[in-house]
Image: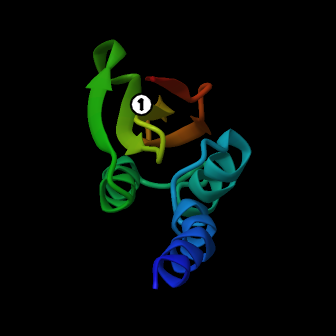
Amino acid sequence: MKRLAHGLLAASLPLVLAGCYTPDRARLGERVAAVVPAGTRLEAAMASLSGMGFSCQVVDAGQGVDCSRERHGAVLYTCIERVRLAVDTGSRSVAAPEVPPIACAGL
């Protein structure tokens, strides 16, 4: 019975770890560019990013928006993903989305 339990545990561990977060800046950049392309109204962009779990704040006297979210990995580490939106102040739309490097810390 012990062998069966150990075998099930060994077989299920890769499945559990496969579902865990792995930092991928390129993939995040692609998702952000698809959801918030240049020209998107600022309010819509912030709502879309909020729907993805980001918390956004207007910075630089309204010329930019910084958004961030925490992601947790399987091995006791946390990563902070950030998105920076340059704002066209005349049209109140996104001039360009940028994804800075993902910062991670943990054991």
In the rendered view of the protein, which quadrant contains the C terminus? top left
Q: In this view, does 94 lie above or below 82?
A: below
Q: Does residue 69 appear left or right of residue 96 in this picture?
A: left
Residue 82 visible: yes
Residue 92 visible: no
Q: Please, what is the three-letter code of the amino acid marked with disc 1?
A: Thr
Tag count in the figure? 1
Q: Which residue is drawn at 52% across and 23% down?
A: 103
Q: Which residue is drawn at 69% across and 52% down?
A: 27
Q: Does residue 27 appear left or right of residue 35 in this picture?
A: right
Q: Residue 22: where, in percent of width, then height?
A: 60, 47
Q: In which quarter of the image is residue 96?
A: top right
Q: How crowded is mark 1: few (under 14 residues within 10 Å), some or many (20 or more)?
A: some
Q: Which residue is drawn at 47% across and 33% down?
A: 82
Q: Which of 71 and 17 is in front in this view?
A: 17
Q: Is residue 41 above or below residue 10?
A: above
Q: In this view, does 46 lie above or below 102?
A: below
Q: Is residue 71 above or below residue 83?
A: below
Q: Does residue 93 appear left or right of residue 11 in this picture?
A: left
Q: Which residue is drawn at 63% across and 66% down?
A: 14
Q: Residue 43: where, in percent of width, then height?
A: 30, 52
User: Label 1, on which residue?
Assistant: 89
Q: Residue 36: where, in percent of width, then height?
A: 53, 55
